[in-house]
Image (spheres, rainbow, N blue to C red):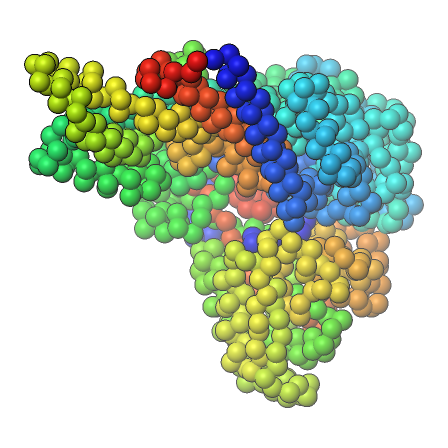
Amino acid sequence: MILYTLRRLGAMALILLAICAITFSVFYLLPDDPALDACGKTCSPERLADVRHAMGLDQPVVAQFAAYVTGIFTGRTLGTTGLECAAPCLGYSWQYTTPVWDLLLDRLGASASLAAGAAALWLVAGVAMGVVAAVRKGTLLDRGIVLSALTMTSVPVYLIAALLIYFVILRSELLPYPDYQPLLEDPAAWAGALVLPWITLAALYAAMYIRLTRASMIETMAEPYIRTARAKGLPERTVVVKHGLRSTVTPILTIFGIDLGGLLAGAMITETMFGLPGLGKLTFDAIGKSDQPVVLGVTLLAAFFITFANLAVDLLYGVIDPRVRYT
Amino acid sequence: MRRSAGLLAAALVTLTACGTKAEVVTGGENGKGGTLTVLATSDFSHLDPARNWTMREMMFGSRLLYRTLTTYKAGSSEIVPDLATDLGTSSDGGKTWTFTLKDGLKYEDGTPIKAADVKHNVERSMAPDITGGPDYAKNLLVGGTEYKGPYDGEHLDSIETPDDKTIVFKLKRPAGEFSYTVTLPTFSPVPEAKDTKVEYDNRPFSSGPYKIEKYERGKELVLTRNEHWDATSDPVRLALPDKIHVKQGQDGDTITDRLIAGSGDDANAIGWLHVGQQSLSKILPNPQAKERLVTMVTGCTDWISFNTPKKPFDDPKVRQAVYHALDKEAIQTAFGGPNMAEIATAYLPPTMTGGAKQDVYAIPPAGDVEKAKALLAEAGVALPLKVKMTTTTTSNTTETAIQESLKKVGIEVELNPVDGAVFNDHSGDLAKADEMSVHGWCPDYPNGSSFLPPILDGRNVMPTGNSGNTAFFKDGEVDKKIDEIYTIEDPAASNKAWQELDSAVMRKLPMAPIAWAKRSFLFGKNVTGVANHPVWAAQPDYATIGVKKSS
């Protein structure tokens, strides 16, 4: 088990390094010149050369990459004025004149709040409705659930967000415009700003989880051991929850790990539309302003969360399902 | 200031139909008090005065956070002394400029503002790490081009501060317009002790009516009163609200909807960005929202640049034929209609000519096809004439309208779409540029020297990287005239001379002006004193904005 975990952590580090290298070279190949963007509206060739040197862009790409990776562990000094970027230095945002790591930490709270709340909602609602639909297979209730799930998956997330904003905030004034505050500073404002984004994301994901749970559950409920459980005279509730759902949950957990990992690095459209200061909004602005260090940093963070969630889920399997326990 | 290809813009001081409210409606005592909320989609580009070179941020910074040697009157392109006691005195034929600071000026911590602090900020604007700011100081000051900033202990000898109140600038060429140049944030004070170099952008030290209480980049900026700012020394800034809260990271459409509804705190809010074409169609039919809208042309001009060294546009007759064939009404529609742009008839926008729209040719707005055909025949051009026009892969509505116009006279325009990121590289490259491309220019201050030389001076044409003179226009007479006008020290006389040069060059027509874009801003019902500023791209002037107590 320990050896397995270590091996997986090693693989994770390699994956992250590869993603870092690929993203880095993609930015290097783009026609956009960060030095020219920073330089100002008119920029003489001499001034441009100075700026490029100050930003470290006059170095060969391999040297730049090496400095970047080293900086993650040891920190760096940037520019010609001795600008400090402490470890873990994921580069420096010239746009925000702030180390990328500080920006990511600052924005993580809103994204994590959004992801956690939405995940709880969609996991509970999605799995519950999926189980109900599977157990009541073929009934009007089942068809209703399946149809609404299909509808929700087909609606783009920005439409859900726009409709919620229009009806809940603008028309009926049930809620004020979101004004996000950190949970510890103002819990009421925190929840108020997040309710609609939670619903938006949960609606999108729950639909997928309903379909997944239903299909998996129908399959499980046809297994011989379910028939045995029923023959033993167990209450139907115990049969469904303890015997049926438990084996259904494994594939759902796998997907859940990846979904949650991805969301922790920001939900770009939802955050942008509701004005949440999360990683998704940070990325959206960074792309618009060609702030490549930030885009690179968010990409790495997202990759970290996804690979880490994957590992966590794999380790959890053993707890849930004794058949896949590692020895 | 170069205009990027995707953005289309222009100018004029019409404070008309859309209800500009220039008078300040009083709320509390003298209209003072309250919190003004500014709703923005994203962070400022730069607030560091040495790096601030976008119209919106220049307005915001120099109205609220720092004072410059001279500045503009509220809602006007007329300049008045700000830190200085007068508009500066020149000697040595306009090559030496001396300013004296007013008595008793203080920073937010009560320490005195010294002439050396203005020198320090000008110097730091030339450091390689302090990017993005105006390059006028670098280009005008003796030794500026070679200077690399004060951080390695070197100082610029062409700025002298013989005492704490006096600052002297030594320039490379006579600059009659220098009183305007020193309105730029480059010419505001930054004390060396408070200079955090690159990170100064996160927390500029205030010499203006407000200081930064909190700035979380991309999230919010909170300004509170600077108690050490002396209102009696300041001819322009009213500093009405007690607090200014800029909320960044809001969705653009949501901002417009909030301002239209204007409920609760949104009645005290103003939009940071201008409203788009689609939002305008929501606002204009709504009388209670429409009266809270101010509109003005931006002060920028958009035009078609002809590749003048290359056939067929080396012949002015062919350029004039194209100009006569243009259906400018169709082009205006491509810009979003009369609410979004006016038809341009000269290079200098009306904001720089006291409102006059110069028009050398007086062609009907929909074009003069017969005259165009006659000019083509006169030039002996074989029809159909095939030319290429650079456009971007993302936006080509203007170019398509131009293409349609020219088809009528037998000119076949092939659009050449390139990635937006390389548009300027491509069209500014003497060897690669196509025959036509759409460009524009916004002046940095309302004097022809900030507009015509960057786009017309043939001595600026380089093999690559041309971003101003995109027609590669070289004309010895024009260059000579530019040098003559530089020496005129009276601003009114020099502006008149620039207008005459504009008309003279229009006859040669290296570029064909097409549009002066407009901008509209929406504000809540308690917000008072909102008026577009003609210099800062029609941005509402924050010097006079206040908040009325809600009734």
B194 is higher (above) or lower (below) than B465: above
Residue B550: percent from the left, percent from the top?
A: 36, 26
Location of residue B83 in the rendering, given as x and y in whole percent from the top left corner: 73, 30
Instruction: Tell me: residue B502, above or below residue B83.
Output: below
Answer whether residue B393 is visible to the viewer in this image.
Answer: yes
Relative side of A159 to B477, left or right: left
* Residue A169 drawn at (x, y percent): 29, 31
Depth check: give the residue in front, B190 or B210. B190
The answer to which image quadrant residue A36 occupies is: top right
| Visible residue check, residue B468 | no
Q: Nearer the viewer, residue B231 or A70?
A: A70
Is A197 left, or right, of B110 in this rendering? left
Residue A232 occupies quadrant: top left
Q: Residue at x 71, y 41 (%)?
A: A35
Task: Pick the quarter of the image with the C terminus of chain A.
Answer: top left
Of residues B297 and B246, the one drawn nearer to the viewer in this rendering: B246
Q: How many numbered tags mark residues here?
A: 0
Residue B347 percent across, percent down from the top left:
65, 62
Q: As displayed, is residue A238 above or below residue B449?
A: above
For the point 48% across and 32% down, which residue is it?
A: A281
Residue drawn at 70 percent across, 23 percent down: A71
Residue B149 quadrant: top right
Residue at the image point whose x is 29% and y is 42% from the top: A155
